[in-house]
Image (cartoon, rainbow, N blue to C red):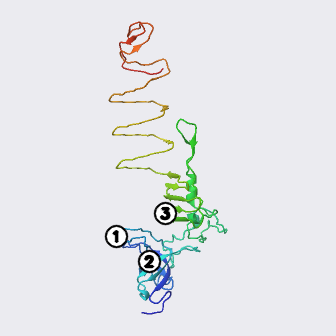
């Protein structure tokens, strides 16, 4: 074996290179890497098809056994460091990790050491929608690719913000009414105030985000779907959840909910409740129902109201049952007796309560 190596110790050949393909036909998470000093940038000399598949090293927390563990893809255009298991043969590369930097040019699919799809690094105007960074670099042009590879949510540079912050703020719901009250409430704003390097961020190529922010005083957990659905837990343990689509919750067993404070439920459309068993409600206080439309109640069995006093309506018309005692002061048709203990002798098929 030749003891002369481009980088590293004898028998252990290091490389630094750029990922050009991650579509592993065996779905093992492997990538193709064009390694500096070992491969050329001339695609005619060493085309992408001839690059060997490199195994990606996983941390010890990843079992890497029959589907157990974690899978994370490496995007083409990413800089990596690794070594060749077969040393000078250079056909069994292993990627040990990725290298962050500040890309200074657009990808060029005609030259090696680039993303053949010409996606990464992205134009900052496409990624952020913002103009200039703290150094005055104009990201609205096609030629500026010098932003750090570290996620913006981790860096929190106020003049180079992340689109998710603006998207969430613009989508906030405000002035939500509370039942039987003139009061309203607003969806809380995000408490994001990350301090580098305390915010641990994972963001996918399409825009899904996870944050575990350890910034002192503003610790947060945040998970965000690219369409806008998210949940965020702030430093005080308060949780905000927004679902931009439909929400389905299926519980195969029992469900227990205990709310120590008040509950304000506002439904902007209809509410349908279907209970196949019994419905037991216990209210230790008062019950107020404010119905602005029609109230229809259909009971196929018996209906019982047991109360000390029942006030049906403050109007001039009421209803009574057959043989109920009434005080009329005279003896009109359908009522027997004239001594103040008159009784209903006939009952109507239709009962109207109120004016």
- The answer to whether residue 81 is left or right of residue 104 is left
**Of residues 120 and 258, the one drawn nearer to the viewer in this rendering:** 258
- Tell which tag, 1 or 3, sits nearer the viewer: 1
The x, y position of residue 150, in whole percent, is 56, 69
Q: Residue furthest left?
A: 301
Q: Is residue 156 left or right of residue 73?
A: right
The number of discs equals 3
Q: CA distance from mark 3 to mark 2?
A: 22 Å
Q: Which residue is mark 2?
A: 32
Q: Could you classify mark 2 by the number of other residues whose Cα lies within 10 Å: few (under 14), some (14-19), or many (20 or more)?
A: many
Crowdedness near tag 1: few (<14), some (14–19) or many (≥20) residues, C-alpha within 10 Å? few
Which callout, 2 or 1, points to the residue nearer the camera? 1
Q: Earlier in the sequence, mark 2 or mark 1?
A: 2
Q: Residue at x 45, y 81 (%)?
A: 47
Q: Nearer the viewer, residue 318 or 239?
A: 239
Q: Which residue is mark 1?
A: 66
Q: Residue at x 42, y 13 (%)?
A: 326
Regarding mark 2 in the picture, which secondary structure is present there? strand
Q: CA gap, disc 2 to disc 1?
A: 23 Å
Residue 320, picture quadrant: top left
- Which residue, given by chain and number where applicable, does mark 3 sit on? 206
Residue 45 locus on image (x, y percent)? 46, 85
Measuring from the top left, give residue 314's x and y in whole percent: 50, 21
Q: Does the residue at mark 1 contact the one at mark 3 (Cβ under 8 Å)? A: no
Residue 228 appearing in the image:
no
């Amino acid at each position: 074996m030749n003891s002369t190596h481009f980088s590293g110790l004898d028998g252990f050949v290091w490389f630094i290179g750029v990922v050009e393909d991650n579509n592993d036909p065996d779905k093992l998470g492997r990538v193709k890497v064009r390694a500096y000093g070992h491969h050329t940038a001339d695609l005619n000399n060493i085309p992408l098809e001839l690059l060997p598949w490199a195994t990606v090293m996983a941390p010890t927390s990843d079992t890497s056994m029959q589907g157990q563990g974690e899978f994370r893809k490496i995007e083409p255009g990413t800089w990596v460091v690794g070594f060749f298991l077969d040393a000078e043969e250079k056909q069994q590369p292993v990627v040990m990790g990725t290298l962050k930097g500040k890309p200074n040019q657009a990808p060029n699919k005609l030259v090696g050491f680039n993303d053949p799809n010409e996606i990464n690094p992205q134009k900052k105007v496409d990624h952020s929608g913002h103009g200039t960074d703290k150094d005055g670099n104009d990201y609205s042009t096609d030629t500026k690719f010098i932003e750090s590879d570290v996620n913006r949510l981790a860096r929190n540079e106020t003049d180079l913000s992340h689109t998710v912050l603006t998207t969430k703020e613009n989508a906030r719901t405000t002035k939500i009414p509370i039942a039987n009250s003139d009061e309203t409430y607003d969806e809380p704003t995000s408490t994001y105030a990350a301090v580098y390097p305390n915010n641990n961020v994972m963001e996918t190529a399409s825009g899904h985000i996870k944050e575990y922010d350890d910034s002192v005083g503003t610790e947060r957990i945040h998970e965000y779907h690219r369409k806008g659905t998210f949940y965020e837990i702030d430093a005080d343990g308060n949780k905000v959840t927004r679902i931009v689509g439909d929400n389905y919750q299926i519980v195969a067993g029992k469900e227990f909910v205990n709310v120590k404070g008040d509950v304000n439920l506002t439904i902007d459309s209809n509410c349908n409740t279907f209970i196949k068993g019994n419905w037991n409600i216990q209210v230790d206080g008062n019950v107020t129902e404010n119905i602005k439309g029609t109230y229809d109640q259909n009971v196929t069995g018996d209906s019982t109201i047991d109360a000390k006093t029942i006030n049906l309506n403050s109007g001039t018309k009421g209803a009574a049952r057959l043989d109920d005692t009434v005080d009329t002061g005279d003896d009109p048709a359908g009522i027997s007796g004239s001594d103040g203990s008159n009784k209903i002798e006939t009952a109507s098929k239709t009962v109207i309560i109120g004016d």
